[in-house]
Image: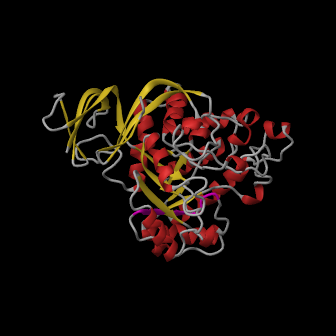
Amino acid sequence: MKTLIRNIGYYSPENGEPLKGNILISEGKIEKFIDATEVEGAKVIDGKFQWLLPGFIDMHVHFREPGGEEKETLETGSRAALAGGYTSVVCMPNTQPVPDHTDAIDDLLARTEKLPCQVLLMGSISKGLAGEEKTDFSLYKHPRFIGVTDDGRPVSNAAILAEALQDGLREGLMVGLHCEDESMMFDRSINQGRISRKLNLQGVPVMAEAIMIHRDLYLAEKLNCPLHIQHVSAAESVRLIREAKARGVLVSCEAAPHHFSLTEEAVLTRGSMAKMSPPLRTQDDVKAVQKGLKDGTIDVIATDHAPHLDSDKTDDLIHSANGIIGLETAFSVGNTYLVDQNILSLKELAYRMSSRPAKLLGLESKGEVSPGMDADLVLVDPNRRWIVDSQCFYSKARNTPYHAMALRGKVTMTMVNGEVRYQEEG
């Protein structure tokens, strides 16, 4: 079955120039760009002169299954991803059980076999994410396992991390790191600074993140091994990574939408809905993350989608859960705070959300709107203004600081392997 999407804006695969036209899809692949607005036997979708971009790829999500299905499931998380324009996601290993042994790995692979979007997986660096004994990386031979991480826990033991970096290189697995020194995370509430002092909280200093990034970059440089730094949040972190890249260190990194759009002040109005790890920082940090995305220091935008129950997000900033959901708002936040602010172009935003993640993950047939590539596509209206209503989300969770906020840019259709998997109602 062929599908023709007509009346679209797209970026030329040859030179990146913005063009208008029609695209023909056949057998799950992009066949060609054409002038015709009708093709015999083809299903026709009218793009209404919106922009067709490569399907977004999120390198950092939590779908909670198995063990936390009351918060999110693989199915509801996948539906939320599609509504946000994501055609591929990478799930973190903080499930119950952790996928660090054969039975748990086999169970997780079976659960992710048939879902509406592509779900890739990260194994654990250490057994039980406890940081005490390295997992046997040879367990992760399946192609859906693309890397290892201890997710929200730093690998404090440098010897374990050194071994993990070398084994990751040998096994072809990305090593993803949450960089915070646990001895300096103190009350694990919010950023240590003006707002924490106002609320009489100890907070988490930037130093906790920067110290671990410095150590991890040093190990990667000395061992000549690649590493991936997760959710960069601070100006000092961006500086360290920029300098390391200039020296030739094999480092990639990601930033979450909340770290380039919100500051620590959001806690005053959004409470624990604005609590995450690492925490929201200052306006200077936000600007540094934005600059890092612009100059390529920060490779990708990843949501760190972290669903929680309403009861997990209390008024107690010390004991309430870390994390927010982000799949269904990520493009809009990026469009509002990066494109509308002339920090990135729409094409550059798509690169950070799709093309660059595809390259880092080795997804050679994804991340580009080009003949021969997988028809994983998203149709967006970058000019649409809308008010976020978390009650309308596909995710089971509602923990977002963007509820009731006005954003610009909306995903209207998502296609996976040439099949429409999400269509905006109305």
Q: Is residue 96 above or below residue 324?
A: below
Quarter of the picture containing the N terminus is: top left
Q: In this image, 264 relative to 98: left or right?
A: right
What stretch of residues is rendered in magenta? 144-152
Q: Can you name the residue that lies furthest to the right here? A: 200
**What colouring method underlies this structural image?**
secondary structure
Residue 90 screen position, x and y as percent: 48, 55
User: Between 285 and 131, which is closer to the camera in this rendering?
Assistant: 131
Identity of the residue drawn at 80% across and 52% down:
187
Q: Position of residue 182 (x, y in %)?
A: 73, 59
State the image coordinates of residue 131 (x, y, percent, origin top left): 65, 69
- Determine whether, in the image, residue 242 is placed left or right of residue 209: left
Compared across the picture, whether 21 is left or right of 36 comes to right
User: Does the rendering let one see residue 299?
Assistant: no
Tell me what residue is drawn at x 71 percent, y 58 percent: 181
Q: Position of residue 241 (x, y in %)?
A: 57, 49
The quadrant of the rendering that contains the C terminus is top left
Residue 301 visible in this rendered orientation of the protein: yes
Q: Quadrant of residue 9?
A: top left
Q: Is residue 138 above or below residue 333?
A: below
Q: Residue at x 79, y 54 (%)?
A: 186
Q: From the viewer's side, name the closer residue of 286 and 119.
A: 119
> 101 or 240: nearer the eye?
101
